[in-house]
């Protein structure tokens, strides 16, 4: 009842619900792979343009990472931090240099709080 008619017409009729669900799973498995590829491309090419706050930018990138994890592709926290840093415009260069020179590695939450401070400093 909840499947759109154009999709319903592509799914063959079966004798049991188990067969039907196996067929539906097989049909849409490639859609998951395609979605994972699309999400990875979006994560790698996303750039901060200043149209929204830095915190919203980080939340959006974190949401993409969570969606990838739901598809079976784990995005490590330190990997996500690097993606976020690489998405920054040149005016955040000193901030990136500072991060690269310290010994500690930040998680996404720590990075977000540091960016909030940096964003307010740049606005002044």
Image: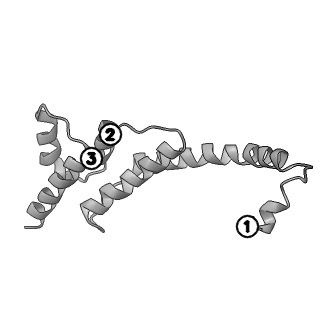
Please say whether residue 46 is visible from this viewpoint. Answer: no
Q: As displayed, is residue 113 above or below residue 29?
A: below
| Residue receiving disc 1 | 2
Give the secondary structure at mark 1: loop
Looking at the image, do the residues carrying marks 2 and 3 touch, with CB atoms under 8 Å apart?
Answer: yes
Quadrant of the rendered image containing residue 122:
bottom left
- In depth, the one of 65 and 95 nearer the eye is 65
Q: As displayed, is residue 45 above or below residue 119?
A: above
| Residue receiving disc 3 | 108
Question: Residue 118 location, x and y as percent?
Answer: 13, 56
* Nearest to viewer (mark 3 / mark 1): 1
| Residue receiving disc 2 | 77
Q: How many marks?
A: 3
Residue at point 88%, 52% (across, down): 12
> Callout 2: few (<14), some (14-19), or many (20+) C-alpha neighbours within 10 Å?
some
Q: Judge left or right: residue 92 versus residue 37.
A: left
Residue at point 31%, 55% (across, down): 58
Quadrant of the rendered image containing residue 30:
top right
Residue at point 25%, 60% (across, down): 54
Question: Residue 57 location, x and y as percent?
Answer: 32, 59
Answer with mark 3 or mark 1, whichever residue precedes in sequence.
1
Give the secondary structure at mark 3: helix
């Amino acid at each position: 009842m909840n499947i759109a008619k154009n999709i319903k017409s592509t799914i063959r009729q079966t004798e049991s619900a188990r067969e039907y669900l196996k067929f539906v799973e097989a049909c849409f498995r490639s859609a998951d792979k395609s979605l994972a590829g699309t999400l990875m491309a979006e994560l790698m090419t996303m750039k901060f343009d200043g149209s929204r706050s830095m915190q919203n930018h980080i939340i959006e990138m974190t949401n993409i990472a969570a969606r990838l994890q739901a598809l079976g592709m784990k995005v490590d926290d330190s990997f996500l931090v690097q993606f976020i840093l690489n998405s920054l415009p040149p005016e955040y260069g000193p901030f990136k240099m500072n991060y690269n020179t310290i010994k500690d590695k930040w998680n996404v939450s720590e990075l977000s709080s540091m960016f909030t401070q940096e964003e307010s400093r740049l606005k002044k």
